[in-house]
Amino acid sequence: MPPAAAVVGRSVTRAFRHLSTQDLHTRRVEEAYRVVVECVAAVDPAMRLYMFGSTAVYGVHEKGSDVDFVALSKTDVEDGKGEDAATQVAKGLQAEFLGKLARVVRQRHFSWNVEEVRRTRVPVVRVKDGSSVDFDITVNRRNGVRNSALLRAYFEQDPPCRWLSMGVKRWSKRAGLNASVVGGSITSYGFNLMVVYYLLRRGALRFIPPAAIDVAQVPPVPPYLPLEPPRNDGAELGEQVLDFLQFYLHEFDAAHHVISLSRPGITTKEQLNWTKNAEDRARMNGEKINYQWCIEDPYELNLNVGRNVTPLKRDFLRRHLEKARETALLTATE
């Protein structure tokens, strides 16, 4: 028998009590942004810098959290609903720009740890111990800005829903489910999509067409969005947590349905051709793609954000969803 909602809410709220003593304002990120803008301008003055990721989505910055920046061309911004190029040529040009940027950052800030990561789906420059904020920089990738703006638009409809998202994200990392942890399979972005999809299915949020998000209309640094304490001493949050777990354990049909913000209502695997046959064909071509737990990316065509969830990891996810009910997202064990 899971604990009462009020107990769950208080437990999750206690897990975030450290935030009450922190300055969550995004001003530290704005300082890092200005430093990176200067470095980007030294490579190409026409490029514009945007922030995306969790700080943009939540409108707050927790101490120790990394920040994501992307340098976009004038064309990228003006064609703010365009698709990102996914060719090897495009990836090579991105790596070339980032190589130049990394050299500028090292020259201007020689004490910083600057790492170029090229052997990833998206080339990135990682900067650690550079200032009060560590950050990653990519280039010519609008999708990150758009998906962050989409999630932000959803959370702005009901800002307290951010507590559910933050609680689920924290739980996913401690449970070993998050891709940032060795053995994890779903990114924080993927868990955010799960949270928003659940809230849409419950009618707690209004559907936003992904096409409505235009980079040209997105502020490069989204403004601070104050985070108020959970309502009713956490009781409402506790109800949401338990209902979220109930939804994914007993209502969401993982065998046939897709977690999707691309269209209102239910999306099936058949609609997207994300079937066992498609999985088998991909393996024959040497691709490791799974359609066990399907999360559709709102902007990148035919991208399953849950593609790394194997049958074993799907069962692992279900076991942790069950355990999360008894442990208030693993907060009652602390």
Image: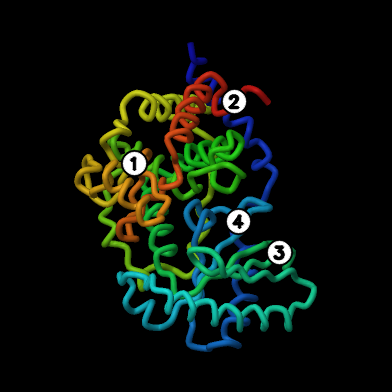
Residue name at image x 53 percent, y 36 percent = 167
Q: Observer-nearest residue: 181 or 130?
A: 181
The residues tagged by marks 4 and 1 sit, at their Cα atoms, a distance apart of 27 Å
Residue 294 to residue 151: above or below: above
Q: Which mark is residue 197?
A: 1
The residues tagged by marks 1 and 2 sit, at their Cα atoms, a distance apart of 24 Å
Mark toward the start of the polypeptide (2 vs 3): 2
Assign a secondary structure to mark 1.
Answer: helix
Position of 40 compared to 210: left or right?
Answer: right
Give the residue number, with chain letter if any, for mark 4. 25
Mark toward the start of the polypeptide (4 vs 1): 4
Residue 49 percent coordinates (x, y): 51, 75
**Residue type, label 2:** Ser
Residue 162 percent coordinates (x, y): 47, 43
Give the residue number, with chain letter if any, for mark 2. 11
Assign a secondary structure to mark 3.
Answer: strand
Mark toward the start of the polypeptide (3 vs 1): 3
Position of 17 compared to 246: left or right?
Answer: right
CB contact under 8 Å: marks 1 and 2: no
Mark toward the start of the polypeptide (1 vs 2): 2
CB contact under 8 Å: marks 3 and 4: no
Residue name at image x 57 percent, y 30 percent = 12
Q: Nearer the viewer, mark 4 or mark 2?
A: 2
